[in-house]
Structures are given as structure tokens and as C-alpha cells.
Amino acid sequence: LLPVVGGNLAAPLAGNGAGGRTARAVNLDYAASAPALQAVADHVAEVLPYYASVHRGAGYASQVSTALYESARQTIGAFVGARPGDLTVFTRNTTDALNLLAGAVPQDGPGAGEVVVLDVEHHANLLPWTARRHRLIPTASTVAETVAALEATLAERPAALVAVTGCSNVTGEILPIGEIARIAHAHGARVVVDGAQLVPHRRVDIAALDVDYIAFSGHKIYAPFGSGVLIGRSDWLDAAQPHLAGGGAVRSVDAQGQAVWTTGVARHEGGTPNVLGAAALAAACRAIADLPEGAVEEHEAALSARLLEGLQEIPQVRVLRAWSDSTDRVGVVGFTVEGHEAARVAVYLSAEHGVGVRDGKFCAHPLLNRLGVTGGALRASLGLGSRSDDVERLLHAVRTLVTEGEKLRYEQIDGAWTP
Ligand code: PMP
């Protein structure tokens, strides 16, 4: 749908008699890190001459850099429907953003700092909470029962916050975050959405959904690594200990080194910020926002339907689902191939077919364990640069694996399968 950098890389095919053969590298690993959009690369090249430290530099480049950084903040906030008064704090990634919020949950407010979390979460939206006061809800086999369990948990005793994923990074299934926000608010709790997998695929409006906080990562939404955001209500953030104590986060420091911390975004952004990362993330948001309404979903829907249908036609393939009644999903598909170790399948797909997927437990151990996946699974994920022949290449490769087996010999070196 939009050109990505590296969309036509040639992948070397490995092994006996491959004789330097290559194939177009098929990237079906957007959910881990999406390739940069060409528009992002162009914007970075355009702003690189103004590379200079922000905020307190008086020079021309510093002024331009500061304006870029602050306008990136506006763009990214507007992209997800931030309300007037919401803060858009730059972080390294989603993990960093959720850890920031975990340190900001008031311990003496309603719910006494307790956070309610589901066990389907990526570790980034699990471990910051389970390290503190929390209640972990074992996910039921349907979305309806899961939401009901959440409501019952909140009704039993108030909580400060509900932390929930917008979209599973294992199964691509989408949770009804608007409904969850309504339930949380009815019980006096706030809600934070882990938007890492949702925001690249769907238009999200936190004001319309009445979501209090959202976190996401630049590298999953077509910008390079190193930038992320936490967006949401200012009061908790203004009252919290600074996420990164240091330069820029203070109003003043006395002779004993005691700080009077500032409020607003600067309180949590100590140190020299990642201006290029912020500009790149904003450029990605702009490029996506400029697409016609529904274009991202439409582009992905057909590819995703074909991917699911093709995988389900292979009897040895099990497509993973967290909930039997989920109706909405993005192009992120977790699966296993019966009789084949996932780690080895991933190497086979790359070495013999030039198809890149991900294998493992996707930093979601509780979910994988609940689904009975012990050795790990595979995940194919789509995005703006995906094409229908990418999907066909994967399907052909998996069919070939189950009918003909691997052609190359693989050995395990240092724990990794190698052709
Ligand atoms: N949440 C979800 C749903 C994710 O898929 C990921 C990344 N795999 C994260 C959080 C963490 O993102 P990051 O590594 O950029 O912090």
C-alpha cells in the first residue's frame, strides 16, 4: 500500500547445491519490527542537516530541531486522538512507556495502586504490573467471558488501573477496548491500552474510546528503532517520580542536589532526547493518516483472509486463537505445524524459501502455555509493504514442508538450527 525501504531485498538461499541462488526476501515479520516507510526515510534525510540538541540551544539548528521535536509530539498525539491536556511523553518503546506508567500509578488513590491485567498480555504489558500490586485474570476461552471476568474482578474490589492489549501479538485478535474502558470507568478504574500491535493496523481514537492511556512503539509502525510514546492523562504523570531523573527534568537543584522537578512531558524525559526518532515516528503517523479512511484495513483484510484460509487448508497446521468468539483481527497469525519444531520450520522457511517469519513464544509465555504450545510457535505478520505473492510464497513453503520435508540437512549449533 505504501513503499517500504528494503522491500525488494534478495535473500541468499542456503545449502547443498543452492549455488549462490537468491530469492526476493519475503518479510512476514512486521509484528516484530516493520520496515521503515520510504516517506519516513525521506523525512529523516530531510531533517538530518538540522541535527542538534533541543530545547536549550539558541543556534538555528537547535531551534529547528526543537520545533521538529515538539511538532512531532503534536502529530503523534493527534494521530491517536489525544485530548487537550493529555501528555505525549517520548520513550524508547512500548516497554519503556508501560514501565513509566507503572511507576506513576498513585498508591493512595482509589484501588490503592492495584492494577488488573489479563494473562494474554505481551510481557511488556504484564511484568511492569506483576512486579507491583496487581490482580492477574486468567483469560477465559471467549472474549465475552473474559470481559465478564474483568468486570467481576473490578466489582469485587476497586482497582486503580486496567492494563489491556489492543491486539494480541500472538493471534492478531482485537479486544473490545472501548467496552473495557467503559467497564473500568464504571468501577472507578482507569485503563491503559498496549497499542504496540493495534496502532499499526487500525485507526485508534483514545478520546472516542475513552481510553486513559495508550503506549506504542515507532519500530512497529514503520519508523526506525528507538522511539515510542506514552500518551494520556497528565495528573498521574505530573505527580509521579520522574521516569528518568536528570537534565531537563528539573526546575532547580539546590546545593545538596535536591531537585524541584518540573511537570509535563519534560518531567519524564530526562537526558538528551531522540529527536530523529520522534521525527521519524511522526512522519510514519502522517503517512498513514494521509491514506484514505479504511485503506490500511482494506489492504490487509484480503491478504490476511488468504493467509488464514491457506494455512487452515493444510491439515498439519494449527492456527492459534486465544478466544473462540473473537470477530475482529489484524494480519498477525500465530500457528504451529504438527510434527515440526517451530524453530526449525522458521530456519527452513528462510533458508529454502527466503521467507522470514518469527518463531518462539513471542514474549507471551502465559498465553502460549494456556494454548498448550510448549516448544514455541510460528508467527506470520503483514503490513503496508505486504503483497499477495508474499502470502503465496509462505503457503507454498509450508505445503512443501509438510509434503516433501526439508531438502537440506540441518544441525543444531549452539542451540540454533543451521542448514
Ligand atoms: N506489546 C506488544 C503487544 C508487542 O507486540 C510488543 C513487541 N513485540 C511490545 C508490547 C513491546 O514493544 P517494544 O519491544 O517495542 O517495547
Image: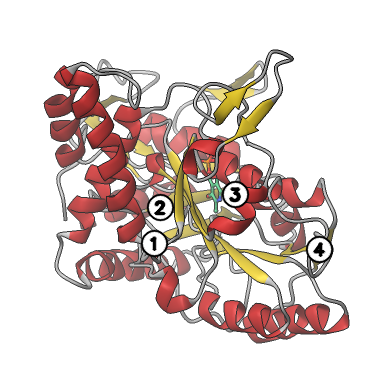
Q: Amino acid at mark 3?
A: Asp
- Which label's residue is closer to the chain start, 3 or 2? 3
- Which label's residue is closer to the chain start, 1 or 4? 4
What secondary structure is found at the residue carrying circle 2?
strand
What secondary structure is found at the residue carrying circle 4?
strand
Q: CA distance from mark 4 to mark 3?
A: 27 Å
Find out if the beta carbon at label 4 lies less than 8 Å from the nearest ligand 1 atom: no
* Residue matched to label 3: 238
* Residue matched to label 2: 381
Q: CA distance from mark 2 to mark 4?
A: 28 Å
Are dots 2 and 1 in contact, CB under 8 Å? Answer: yes
Q: Amino acid at mark 2?
A: Ser
- Which label's residue is closer to the chain start, 2 or 4? 4
Q: Amino acid at mark 4?
A: Leu
- Which label's residue is closer to the chain start, 4 or 3? 4
Are dots 1 and 4 in contact, CB under 8 Å? Answer: no
* Residue matched to label 1: 331
* Residue matched to label 4: 136
Q: CA distance from mark 1 to mark 4?
A: 27 Å
- Please state which of the two labelled residues, at mark 1 or mark 3, is closer to the viewer: 3
Find out if the beta carbon at label 1 lies less than 8 Å from the nearest ligand 1 atom: no
Say which residue appears at 59% left-offset and 37% top-offset.
Answer: 343
